[in-house]
Image (spheres, rainbow, N blue to C red):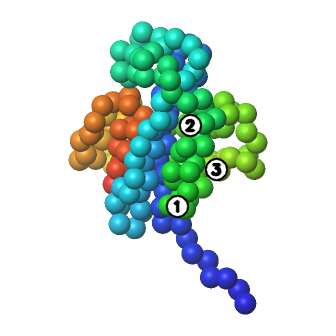
């Protein structure tokens, strides 16, 4: 008897905030949504202790201070917490991201092989999708800018604080749903 293929309908949007100049992860944000209903089912964030002081520029940009990360879990523990939190949703393996590389950077900083990592080797890059749509519609439209400047071009307003990993993940997912 063959098993019927059931496509995954839940996707996870992933965003990271990084300290500088080390590029160590200091916050993991994620949002889970259903591509059929366009509903955001869950969203959360986890601070990560980088075991170094937060750069003042990063504190100004993100609002993340040494106080936030001092007693935060290690990256390994934060990853396990996220993994346990998202497991019931059975999300598609490739995360939705703004730009490329967040899932790859997470895997690299964890020192994990692809076979042990919960995300695939690829990601769904909403920034590239949005830029493609803008160029297609306007021909030579200025497609530079971050998530907050791109969303209004699609009739959406950024909700929350920019450069907060959870808010960025939620808004990336909202824009992805709009592009679908």
Label located before the other in sequence (1 or 3)? 1
Whole-Å distance between the Cαs marked 2 and 1?
Answer: 17 Å
Which one is nearer the viewer's eye here, 124 or 74?
74
Return the x and y of residue 46 as percentages of the image width and height: 47, 35
Q: Does residue 70 appear left or right of residue 170 in this picture? A: right
Label located before the other in sequence (2 or 1)? 2
Q: Residue at x 57, y 13 (%)?
A: 52
Return the x and y of residue 30 as percentages of the image width and height: 46, 44
Return the x and y of residue 173 as percentages of the image width and height: 40, 49
Label located before the other in sequence (3 or 2)? 2
List the residue tagged with mark 3.
118
Q: Residue at x 42, y 17 (%)?
A: 67
Whole-Å distance between the Cαs marked 3 and 2?
Answer: 13 Å
- Which element carries disc 3, helix, strand or loop? loop
Q: Is residue 143 visible?
A: no
Q: Does residue 158 appear left or right of residue 120 in this picture? A: left
Q: Residue at x 36, y 21 (%)?
A: 63
Q: Residue 65 occupies which quadrant of the picture? A: top left
- Which element carries disc 1, helix, strand or loop? helix
Q: Residue at x 75, y 50 (%)?
A: 115
Classify the position of the C terminus by image quarter: bottom left
- Which element carries disc 2, helix, strand or loop? helix
Q: Residue 162 occupies which quadrant of the picture? A: top left
Q: Residues within 10 Å of mark 2 (few under 14, many from 20)?
A: some
Which one is nearer the viewer's eye here, 130 or 116?
116
Mark 3 in CB contact with mark 2 (< 8 angstroms): no
Q: Does residue 43 appear left or right of residue 83 in this picture? A: left
Return the x and y of residue 12 as percentages of the image width and height: 49, 51
List the residue tagged with mark 2.
78
Which one is nearer the viewer's eye here, 79 or 166?
79
- The count of marks equals 3
């Amino acid at each position: 008897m063959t098993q019927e293929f059931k496509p995954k309908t839940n996707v996870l949007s992933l965003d990271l905030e990084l300290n500088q100049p080390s590029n160590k992860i200091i916050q993991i944000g994620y949002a889970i949504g259903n591509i059929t209903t366009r509903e955001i089912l869950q969203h959360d964030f986890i601070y990560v202790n980088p075991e170094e002081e937060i750069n003042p520029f990063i504190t100004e940009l993100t609002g993340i201070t040494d106080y936030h990360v001092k007693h935060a879990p290690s990256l390994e523990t934060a990853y396990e917490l996220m993994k346990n939190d998202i497991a019931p949703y059975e999300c598609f393996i490739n995360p939705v991201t703004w730009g490329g590389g967040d899932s790859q950077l997470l895997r690299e900083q964890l020192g994990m092989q692809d076979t042990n990592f919960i995300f695939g080797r690829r990601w769904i890059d909403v920034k590239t999708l949005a830029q493609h749509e803008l160029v297609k519609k306007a021909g030579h439209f200025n497609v530079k800018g971050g998530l907050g400047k791109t969303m209004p071009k699609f009739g959406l307003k950024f909700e929350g604080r920019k450069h907060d990993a959870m808010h960025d993940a939620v808004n990336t997912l909202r824009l992805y749903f709009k592009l679908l």
